């Protein structure tokens, strides 16, 4: 079948494979840099997989670049105290929303993934998103030479740039780096659910037990996003449903944990085994093709950075590719920027997952003691995220005014630390 060339226009053409948060961010950022973009999604409709996402300040600083950061900050629901607890409800470490916002230049914002996906899609040109269109790599292309090519049911598509945003089981990654071992099971499985407002106020928290973790976080609209993690064999599933499994594992934990589980409807609890790319890729690009998000650096969710790093990827990629000239140099700069940062966060997330996985009473007692010592002040409890949540994008935000002042104030705060 002959390749289907993109329309003959002056602007360079980028094809993004996958319509997750990272792929959509890249598409919007490239569009705003003057690229024509086509997003190919294999599903018949764009549906936000998962329940909620925690957008840390680094995530909304990145979204500032495409004019979306302020909208996201307005969705912040965490006010006042929060922190780490034990299954019986004792506080291990406390912090508060004001301390987090001051330290990192913005709040932690919990949103439903569908909310973020919808707002990203709204910033794309009409007709740029094609659903029901699976794409596989045919040729990564050569920077300064032949275009990249992806194969679809409607024929091959040539592009000046292809962005592989096709998730942890990325076909794009396997094509670019066939010798890489791919994702490995972390030993942890996770559950996620969104339930209606319980009518009972609570302080946002993560609670750590023996080989398990539970988190309860409010959303702006009053609903509650809850997540859990536990040591389990890969592929293990509950014969009587995942809500029943949560009740067995967490039903005797402190409130509001049991109430949240009770409020979950049939089939609402999502369960996924956690795989990660603990072996880093040699680069995030080859030829005219780049990888981002889970396709490039899938990580354990213990630091809440998977989605944030995918958003950063999309912004940094567009930053280095103002046009097709110098594509090879731009993609090399993208890899050089993103590979060291994401590798460090993948490894740090894996270390935190090992702390969650501790099950012996002595080891858990030592871990909890260290948490209490770290929680002597809000600043100490937040130090885990230094160098992560305080990241700023490599260019001035498109929107001036309050956001620029926030960035300048944050930079001044960082200089004083």
Image (cartoon, rainbow, N blue to C red):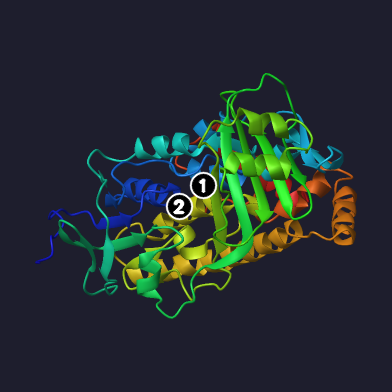
Nearer the observer, 194 or 243? 243
Crowding near the residue tagged with mark 1, few <14, some 14–19, many ≥20 C-alpha atoms within 10 Å: many
Q: Is residue 372 left or right of residue 207?
A: right
Q: Residue at coordinates 45% horizontally, 44% vertically from top-left? A: 49
Quick one: SS at disc 2? helix
Q: Is residue 346 above or below residue 89?
A: below
x then y, percent, for residue 160: 25, 63
Q: Is residue 315 left or right of residue 309?
A: left
Crowding near the residue tagged with mark 2, few <14, some 14–19, many ≥20 C-alpha atoms within 10 Å: many
Confirm or deny contact between disc 2 and disc 1 (CB under 8 A).
Answer: yes
Q: Residue at coordinates 55% horizontally, 40% vertically from top-left? A: 269
Q: Which residue is mark 2?
A: 315
x then y, percent, for residue 367: 85, 57
Q: Residue at coordinates 34% horizontally, 67% vertically from top-left? A: 289
Q: Which mark is residue 62?
A: 1
Quarter residue 361 falls in: bottom right
Quick one: SS at disc 1? helix
x then y, percent, for residue 288: 31, 69
């Amino acid at each position: 079948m002959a390749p289907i060339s993109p329309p003959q226009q002056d602007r360079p053409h980028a094809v993004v494979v996958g319509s997750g948060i990272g792929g959509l961010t890249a598409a919007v950022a490239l569009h705003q840099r003057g690229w024509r973009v086509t997003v190919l999604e294999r599903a018949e409709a764009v549906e936000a997989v998962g329940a909620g996402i925690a957008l840390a300040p680094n995530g909304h600083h990145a979204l500032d670049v495409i004019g979306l950061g302020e909208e996201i900050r307005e969705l912040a629901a965490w006010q006042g105290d929060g922190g780490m607890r034990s299954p019986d409800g004792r506080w291990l470490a406390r912090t508060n929303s004001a301390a987090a916002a001051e330290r990192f230049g913005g709040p932690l914002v919990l949103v439903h993934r569908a909310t973020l996906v919808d707002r990203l899609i709204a910033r794309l040109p009409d007709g740029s998103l094609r659903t029901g269109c699976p794409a596989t790599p045919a040729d990564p292309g050569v920077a300064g030479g032949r275009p990249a090519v992806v194969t679809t049911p409607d024929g091959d598509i040539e592009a000046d740039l292809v962005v592989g945003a096709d998730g942890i089981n990325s076909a794009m990654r396997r094509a670019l780096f066939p010798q890489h071992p791919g994702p490995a099971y972390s030993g942890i499985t996770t559950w996620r659910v969104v339930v209606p407002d319980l009518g009972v106020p609570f302080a946002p928290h993560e609670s750590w037990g023996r080989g398990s973790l539970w988190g309860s976080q409010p959303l702006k609209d009053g609903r509650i996003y809850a997540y859990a993690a536990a040591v389990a064999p890969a592929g293990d599933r509950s014969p009587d449903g995942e809500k029943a499994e949560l009740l067995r594992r967490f039903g005797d934990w402190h409130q509001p944990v049991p109430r949240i589980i009770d409020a979950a409807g049939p089939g609402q609890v999502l369960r996924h085994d956690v795989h990660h790319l603990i072996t880093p890729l040699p680069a995030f690009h080859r030829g005219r093709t780049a990888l981002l998000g889970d396709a490039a650096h899938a990580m354990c969710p213990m630091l809440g950075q998977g989605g944030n790093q995918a958003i950063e990827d999309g912004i940094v990629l567009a930053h280095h590719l103002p046009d097709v000239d110098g594509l090879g140099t731009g993609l090399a700069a993208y890899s050089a920027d993103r590979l060291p940062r994401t590798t460090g966060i993948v490894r740090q997330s894996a270390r935190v997952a090992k702390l969650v996985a501790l099950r012996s009473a002595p080891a858990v007692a030592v871990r909890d003691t260290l948490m209490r010592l770290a929680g002597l002040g809000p600043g100490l409890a937040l130090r885990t995220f230094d160098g992560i949540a305080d990241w700023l994008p490599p260019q001035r935000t498109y929107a001036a005014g309050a956001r620029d002042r926030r960035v300048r104030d944050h930079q001044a705060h960082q200089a004083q630390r």
